Image (cartoon, rainbow, N blue to C red):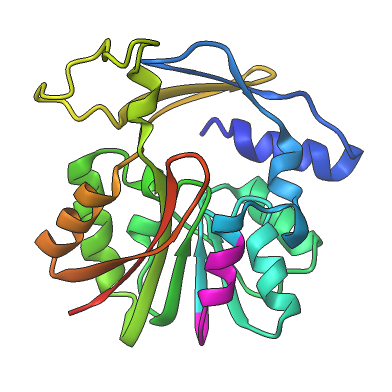
Amino acid sequence: MNDPFGLAINDFYRKGKAPDIKVDSNYTKDERISVSHFFRDENEMPEIEKAALKKCKGKVLDVGAAAGCHSLALQKKGFNITALDKSELSVEVMKKRGIQKFICSDIFEYSGNTFDTVLLLMNGTGIGGTLEGLKKLFRHLKTLLSENGQILIDSSDIKYLFEEDDGSLWIDLASDKYYGEMKYKVKYKNETDEFNWLFIDYDLLNKTALDTGLKCELAASGNHFDYLARISLK
């Protein structure tokens, strides 16, 4: 399996530097992700992520943990934290960085334990890929929640990407395809990967949660159309 993110994270850990990850999508071209982004400490995180860490409680599962920056921050605070990522290289780096509990698995294939907090950050809704995929993700995460458990998940309303200077939109928001459903192609060195990635506005996230038997509340708002939601069992 190609693993550009894992390879980049591994390179950065070993060498202290790495080339940017290149990203193309159905809306954007030639964007770049600095690999150092996955190695931030808590002080370098945006307010949305800081708010999420403060709202964690009990036993925590960090989904899509990458290099483990959120898991390390919580572990230092004394939390019972388990970091999960499907990239073997990323999990190896997390282990070397001192994360004590880790799982190498796709979240959709993981089951067994339950948690008081399931944490999905750095646009956590993206893991769903599509609106239908997000419903599938929520249904699965319900099985991983303790009785009073919570899901902390962030996203952004990317409608601003389609606004012209005069306030008009260059995309039809009423089309059958939701504008937040993106197709990503990422490349690091010679490794590439393609996948669906979902950005979702809060109102639709709230509806999706309700449709899957969950309740949702807005937990924090960021400075650039981003937000943190807290989702729990009804």
Residue 184 lies, in percent from the top left, at 43, 24
Image height check: is 131 above or below 135? above
Image height check: is 45 above or below 199? below
Give the farthest residue toward the right: 15
| Left or right of residue 20, residue 4 in this image | left
Residue 73: quadrant of the picture: bottom right
Find out whether residue 187 is within the magenta segment.
no
Residue 152 lies, in percent from the top left, at 42, 66
Find out whether residue 53 is within the magenta segment.
yes
Q: Which residues are magenta?
A: 50-59
| Left or right of residue 209, residue 56 in this image | right
Residue 210: quadrant of the picture: bottom left
The quarter of the rendered structure image containing the C terminus is bottom left
Figure label count: 0
Residue 161: quadrant of the picture: top left
Residue 56 lies, in percent from the top left, at 52, 77
Residue 182 lies, in percent from the top left, at 34, 27
Give the overall secondary structure of the magenta segment: helix
Instruction: Give the residue drawn at x 49%, y 39%.
Output: 224
Instruction: Give the residue drawn at x 58%, y 74%.
Output: 54
Image height check: is 35 above or below 127? above
Query: 31 and 146: which one is in front?
Result: 31
Image height check: is 116 above or below 123? below
Instruction: Give the residue drawn at x 63%, y 51%.
Output: 46
Query: 49 and 68: which one is in front?
Result: 49
| Left or right of residue 52, residue 148 in this image | left
Query: 98 and 131: which one is in front?
Result: 131
Instruction: Give the residue drawn at x 42%, y 81%.
Output: 115
